[in-house]
Amino acid sequence: MGKMFECMSEHAGAVKILERIHGILSCDPGQAFFDGAVTTVAELLGVPCVLLGRYEGDARTLQVLSWYRGGLIEHNGTLSIQGTPIERILDEGRPYACDRNAWRLFPQDEALRTWRAECYLGVPLKDRVSGEVVGIVAVYAAEPREFTQTERALLELVGSCLAKELERSRREAIIQQLHRKLRHAQKMEALGALTAGIAHDFNNLLTGILGFTELMLMQLESEHGDRDEIVPHLHQVLTLSQRARDLVRQLLLLGRPEESAERMCALHALVKDFAAFLRRLIPESIQIELDLAPEAITVEANPTHVQQVLLNLVLNARDAMPQGGRLCIRTERVRPEAFRIPIRTRVQHRPYVRLSVSDTGTGIAPGVLSRIFDPFFTTKGTGTGLGLSIVREIVHSYGGWIEVESEPGYGTSFHIFWPLAEEPTARVGAEAEEPMPAGGGETLLLVEDDPTILKLGQSLLERLGYRVVIARDGREAIEVYARHREEVRLVLLDVVLPEISGAHVLEELRRINPQVRILAMTGYGSKDQLKDFPWEATDGWLLKPYDLRSLAHALRRCLDKEKEPPHCR
């Protein structure tokens, strides 16, 4: 009778284990799967600590994916494997167990030391195809203990499930990276189609700037120079310079990789800026019209993606009108109930905006229309044929869709449906309507390695009513601030500096005074292009080239805002 009850107990325990493993397999993929697995192992084996990590072979480190420690789960961190049982498992490619004195046998293992772990059991996670070790799952226990064959088999079974999920997540990450590279390559191809127009516009801008500057110099050097003639020339130079600045910013925005996590786009502001950019780059025989909805519209999309969609559609429209014509960009709010029956499967019950790009070009033949979104399909004889397939992929990724209307000889209309954001973005251009704020005699430290920009910045700041001390590089900036820390209210810091980086200068300034206010300045098109710079540790940032108004507003925002304690940064 006793043996029968023992068998029944073992059977019940096996059923419980199988039920828990089934529960792991039922979890959502990704992080939920990893967390469920380490929690289940900890509870079934009765251990306080279970580690799941991905092996980073080049760096000889383990990236923590999920770490169960005393009932809590951590996801971040990198562990050095040197001198640890993890190193042994990875090198030998087989499980390793230690029944007692684990923390003494591996004194370099911080986790073993922290937990004073007496016993340890680790299992390698292997790629099913290559046999390569891709990670590890390990358990730690505070008391001496010999793991049974059943317990070891359980950990190996869970480990095989985790290895499959690691393979899947790694493949998915590679595919996503390839998609990003493909979209970026196609965007560069589209920008390449505009190079002639870009060069033409830059040459026109530079001709104007050089010409008006020479006229002013001649009038100033002349005995009969007239101030009333010089002032209009200066305004022309200023206008041409602003156009050149805007052109460069548009190119940088279009050309940057899509790592930015921004998910909100003020659609009308973007369309207006983009149309101004296009007017200078497509043939003058093509007339651009905007027909925008009267109310502000914000869509849930990365602005770079919206620009890439517009760029591809506009280039197609340009190519369809070799003799000229009319290009119209239109926006309109629409409700789900207004959509046609065939597309209802993609519609969510929420408002959308219809962004339409229409041309009066040659149109698309019915036999071709059904294939225009196929990858690598093109009727132009040049290019990759990826433009419209990338457009559809981007639009679908945000829960939208695209429709096409075309008739040969009468033109084509592409209708993009984007989900509207819940809240509108802040009013664009508000600062331009406000009076220019002046300084109140505050002392500022200007750090800039370019002598021309340093002199210009100092003159502009003094014109605004500030007292200025200067530094020509990072080392001088630290020395000057250390001498004048009681006077300096704000540091204007160029992010890219020779010898000592802007990030290091910022760190040293914070060490001298944790409450120092810092306005970071960069000539890059976006702060996303300088990922190693600690933007969160600054009080604001300013893109070059800046004008007097944008500089004045940036200064007041930094000087007037409430200062947070250092630990809140």
Image (cartoon, rainbow, N blue to C red):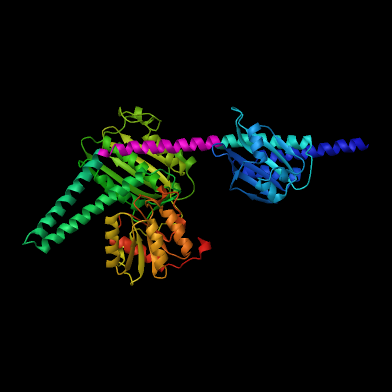
Residue that protrudes farthest toward the bottom in the picture? 440
Q: Residue at coordinates 47% horizontally, 61% vertically from top-left?
A: 510
Q: Is residue 174 above or below residue 112?
A: above
- In terms of image quadrants, where is residue 197? top left
Res 423 quadrant in image: bottom left
Task: Tell whether position 185 is magenta.
Answer: yes
**Residue 73 colored magenta?**
no
Along the line of sight, which residue is nearer the eye, 24 or 328?
24
Q: Is residue 278 above or below residue 509?
A: above
Residue appearing at x 8%, y 61% in the figure: 225
Q: Is residue 238 visible?
A: yes
Quadrant in which the N terminus is drawn: top right
Magenta: predominant secondary structure element? helix
Is residue 161 among the parts visible in the rendering? no
Percent coordinates x, y for residue 518 in the rendering: 41, 61
Residue nearest the observer in this picture, 235 or 458: 458
How far across and down, in percent of the image, does residue 543 sit? 34, 55
Q: How many marks?
A: 0
Indicate left or right for 433 with 237 as reference.
Answer: right
Residue at the left extreme of this rendering: 224
* Residue 454: % across, % down: 30, 58
Residues shaded magenta: 170-195
Depth check, front residue: 115 or 183: 115
Residue lying furthest right in this view?
Answer: 1
Q: Position of residue 336 (x, y in %)?
A: 45, 47
In the shown orientation, is residue 346 left or right of residue 520?
A: right
